[in-house]
């Protein structure tokens, strides 16, 4: 998810997307532990997407 998409999304949408990405990230970690992923960079991109969304949600709480 791009930063511009994150800023335009509503808080509820961001919370749903955060839960979805966290679940997908957990599934990928488990799959990677069993057998190596074809593209392990997916883990990094998902981790960063989680951080971006969490940061935006925190910023909105403060305001």
Image (spheres, rainbow, N blue to C red):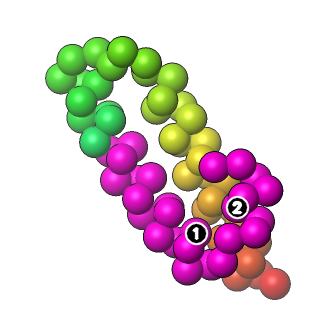
Q: Residue sitting at 76 percent across and 53 percent down?
A: 3
Distance, label 1 to label 2, CA atoms, is 7 Å
Do callouts 1 and 2 mark residues in contact (Cβ within 8 Å)?
A: yes
- Work out whether 10 lies above or below 22: below
Q: Which residue is mark 1?
A: 14
In x, y percent, where is residue 4? 79, 56
Q: Residue sitting at 50 percent across and 63 percent down?
A: 17
Q: Please check the rendered image and state whether residue 17 is part of the magenta-colored stretch, yes or no.
A: yes
Q: Please check the rendered image and state whether residue 23 is part of the magenta-colored stretch, yes or no.
A: yes
Dot 2 alpha-carbon crowd within 10 angstroms: few under 14, some 14 to 19, many 20 or more: some
Q: Residue sitting at 75 percent across and 69 percent down?
A: 8
Label 1 secondary element: helix
Label 2 secondary element: helix
Q: Which residue is mark 2?
A: 6
- Work out whether 63 lies above or below 58: below
State which region is magenta: 1-26
In x, y percent, where is residue 22? 41, 53
- Work out whether 34 lies above or below 9: above
Q: Which mark is residue 57?
A: none
Image quadrant of residue 60? bottom right
In x, y percent, where is residue 24? 36, 47
């Amino acid at each position: 998810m791009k930063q511009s998409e994150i800023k335009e999304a509503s808080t509820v949408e961001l919370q749903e997307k955060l839960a979805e990405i966290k679940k997908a990230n957990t599934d990928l970690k488990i799959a990677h532990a069993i057998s190596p992923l074809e593209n392990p960079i997916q883990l990094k991109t998902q981790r960063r997407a989680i951080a971006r969304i969490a940061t935006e949600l925190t910023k909105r709480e403060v305001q």
